[in-house]
Amino acid sequence: MDRRLFLAALAASPLLSSPASAQNWPAKPIRLIVPFTPGGTVDILSRLLGQQMSKILKQPVVVENRPGAGGNVGMEVVARAPADGYTLVMGSIGTCSMNPYLYDKIGFDVDRDFVPVMLVGSVANLLVVHPSVPATSVKELVALAKARPDSITFASSGFGSSLHIAGELFQSVAGIELRHVPYKGSAPAVTELVGGQVNMMFDNMPSIAQHALAGRARPLAVTSVKRSKLFPDVPTMQEAGYPGFIVAPWFGVLAPAKTPEGVLTKLNAALNQGLRDATVQKRLAQIDLEPAGGSGADYGRLIKSESERWSKLIREKNIRPE
């Protein structure tokens, strides 16, 4: 073979083109898939961080909502996408550490099909009731539920969501029976709660806080280790008498497996830089979201440990999507 043709063929080979593509990345817009409906915490966080990533990477970061099946639809989209760094997903405690144990068949495997890029942060859930519910504390709510079994309705963002799992955990530790009312996302669930169509729910702080502060929903407890800065007078579930009741939903960016290491390094750097931005930090403080950051390996370890924790509850309660 002619030496020039050989060198040209060698340069075009995948082994040498991958580092080059990583070096030139990004050369076009990036899709950030949100596997849930607009208006929820994952959507709010993705749009906030996407704006900063656009500035840092000098390419548009287009947030695309692909809801369905508890987040599985959006996750499958990214699992099947080219591993080139141009299609990402904002994963969550539900899609990464709960769904694999809730669904008999899903079109992706978290370990096989994804690589963690960075943990963005975590939030507390806020236990709220509609103002018409005659309960001003967790103790009073439990007493009401015991006096009226299966009559208190609790909303969630869907079967198998972290909000649903929080409600199931509450029933388990409190010895009560509630009636689950699932919705297609957190936003419609909150709308129904505020409207009085359902009695209570656990919701992520960013999407429920404004309603609780305005008196449209009554906060009874937070599910974090410590009290919320937004609601300093509201006790934790542990303070309310339920030791170990800690549900801290988290969110982080994942890419398709086999994404070039150079691209992952650039992505992680951009995400960490965006998270440190003063405007982002201020906004996260307003919605009481605890920023994280760090390496992809850190995020991967969290996914594994949380999977071990929640799979146990899901199996014990035999929680299945309906």
Image (cartoon, rainbow, N blue to C red):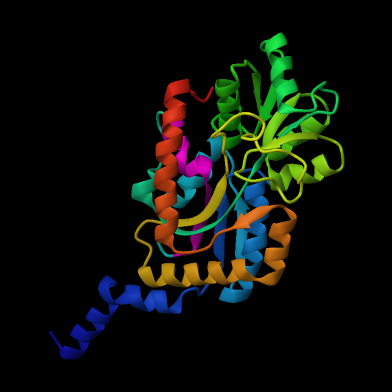
Would residue 20 be visible to someone looking at this image? Answer: yes
Along the horizontal axis of the image, is 311 left or right of 322? Answer: left
Classify 276 as above or below 316: below
The answer to whether residue 15 is above or below residue 102 is: below
Residue 83, image x, y percentages: 40, 60
Q: Image height check: is 221 above or below 55?
A: above
Residue 188, position as x, y percentages in the image: 73, 35
Residue 239 included in the magenta stretch of the image: no
Question: Which quadrant holds residue 179?
Answer: top right
Q: Name the outermost residue toward the left.
A: 1
Q: Nearer the viewer, residue 113 or 282?
A: 282
Count the marks: 0
Quarter of the rendering containing residue 52: bottom right
Position above or below: 31 against 319: below
Report whether 307 appears left or right of 165. Answer: left
Q: Locate the N terminus by quadrant.
A: bottom left
Q: Quadrant of residue 126?
A: top right
Task: Pick whichever, 253 or 312, lies toward us.
Answer: 312
Magenta residues, start to end: 85-103
Which residue is pictured at 54% across the width and 31% down the height? 160
Q: Percent x, y for residue 21? A: 39, 75
Q: Position of residue 260 (x, y in %)?
A: 36, 67
Residue at left offset 43%, top offset 37%: 309
The quadrant of the image that shows the C terminus is top right
Check if residue 89 falls in the magenta segment: yes
Is 239 or 141 nearer to us in this picture?
A: 239
Kindly identify the residue that appears in the image at 47 percent across and 37 percent down: 98
Along the line of sight, the residue nearer the viewer: 157 or 298: 298
Q: Which residue is pictured at 64% across the width and 44% down the height?
A: 124
Q: Is residue 103 visible?
A: no
Left or right: 32, with 4 as reference point: right
